[in-house]
Amino acid sequence: MFKFNATIVGLLASTLAAGIAFAKTDNTKINIYIDLDANAKNAHKQLQALKNMDVIGVNLKKHWAEVAVTKEELKQLQTLNLIIRKAKHSFTLSDEYLNPEQVVQALEKIHGQYPAITKLFEFGKTHQQRPIMALEISAHLDNLDKPVVIFNAMHHAREVMTPEVVMHIANVLTEKYGQDSEITNWLDQYRIVLVPQVNPDGNSFVSAGQTMWRKNAYELRGEVVGVDINRNYPAYWNYCDGSDSNPRGEAYRGPSAGSEPETVAMMNLVNTYKPVAEISYHSYSEMILYPFGCSNVKNPSKALFHSIGQAMNAKILNDDNQTNQYEVGTVPELLYNADGGDIDWLWKEQGVLAFGIEVNSSNFHPNYKKWRNVTVKRQEGGWQALIRRMSQSGFRAHVQTSTPNEVSYSIKKIEGNQKLAFDGDAPERTFPLRSTNGLLYQLTEKGRYEVTFFVKNQSVKSITIQVGETLVDLGDIPLA
């Protein structure tokens, strides 16, 4: 067993003596920094040891992690050879950040200004009966032949910058339609669906002063304990020790997979819109994350995800106003195991190219006047790169059939005499069509592919496609 450095013990003792006293309950927390090893593998081991604690944020380039710890967790850390420093910033929240009511008002204002290209709708309710709202933006609202991209924010209530990013996307797209030729083309070609606040109940607690609240408003025996919505999705739920079974834990996964109204609402939204790609915004750590969240689950389409992630990284400006500075990879590669996340469910169950972007380099609640406009502007390059990718390598078609919901397709990459499964862990995996009108829309790497169509799981047709730099339009594909 490691011995805890005596200087660290002294630091913690002085920290507590300075006025950060614990209440009798174990839930009272203080914030600390833990210095990470400069060696990436050693840093990863350190982060794995922290996975069941409230890891607030990580800065891999500057080699530290911020953690909110209880007295009992502090005792656990005393068994490790870690260098610990007191966190210097407080979590004071500016009332200029949007609360749940203000999010709805802001969406209503945009819809009122641009009714011809927006559709505002409620697609779920929370435990406390708050509406979960979405805004569709397109020149062709509800047109099932137009592929969809979804942007969502605030699965975690304290991540107050994230709704600002999604609201900024709404403002840019609506204000520049008809003015900017590229944005006009996007809205002519695609449907963009925005969910600025997945977790309005949690945000109501944050806005009321519980500034470190992370979860939703799930109640246990009359007490609000909350569920981490982003550990509640059915894909790999409770699969790899990447969430908490303790209802009072910050990463509590919930009583069962998909138990929470917010989770159900998001899954229903995806099932309705059948998006091609998605970004889920979080804070903080300056990372671009993609599936899967468990180290023992490999993603054979990793190269495709990584290339898209790096394309976004090349356009996002970090807090130091530099591009190519976000870390790009899976959650366990960069942090620790995390199961039950939305991007895993989106890819595994729906075939959506889904990413999680962690904005800002420090602090859940950056000074609003200093950082709000700067941050949302610097994120523009990322979401625009994803939309831009929609017209690059891949293929689309319109499948002619009377039963599109019964149609699926498999993809195999042809290299020489070999046919490599698009998803090697599930070589017979099939993907659904992107609309009930028969839309097929698939982004890939460049190469030659065999696409096989199935109706009621029975193979009915195979075609070969050569994919280059731009999207291949296959036109109509009739199926018997």
Image: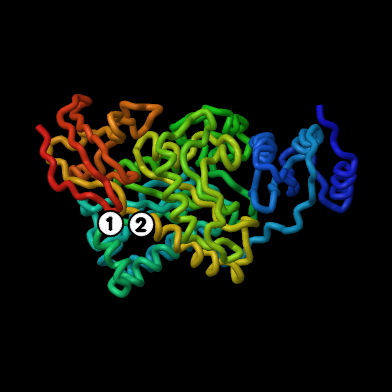
| Image point (48%, 63%), residue name | 102
Q: Position of residue 61 (x, y in %)?
A: 65, 52
- Separation of marks 1 and 2 at Cα, in angstroms: 9 Å
Q: Amino acid at mark 2?
A: Ile
Marks 1 & 2, CB-CB < 8 Å contact = yes
* Residue sitting nearer the eye, 375 or 265: 375
Q: Position of residue 73 (x, y in %)?
A: 75, 36
| Image point (19%, 50%), residue name | 473
Quarter residue 112 falls in = bottom left
* For residue 200, above or below residue 245: below
Residue ranking furthest to the front: 416
* Residue sitting nearer the eye, 307 or 296: 307
Q: Which mark is residue 190?
A: 1
For label 1, the SS is: loop
Residue ranking furthest to the top: 458
Q: Which mark is residue 121?
A: none
Quarter residue 408 falls in = top left
* Residue sitting nearer the eye, 397 or 39: 39
Task: Decide if residue 246 is in sight here.
Answer: yes
Q: Position of residue 330 (x, y in %)?
A: 52, 41
- Mark 1 or mark 2: whose residue is earlier in sequence: 1
| Image point (18%, 44%), residue name | 437
* For residue 325, above or below residue 257: below
Task: Decide if residue 50 is in sight here.
Answer: no
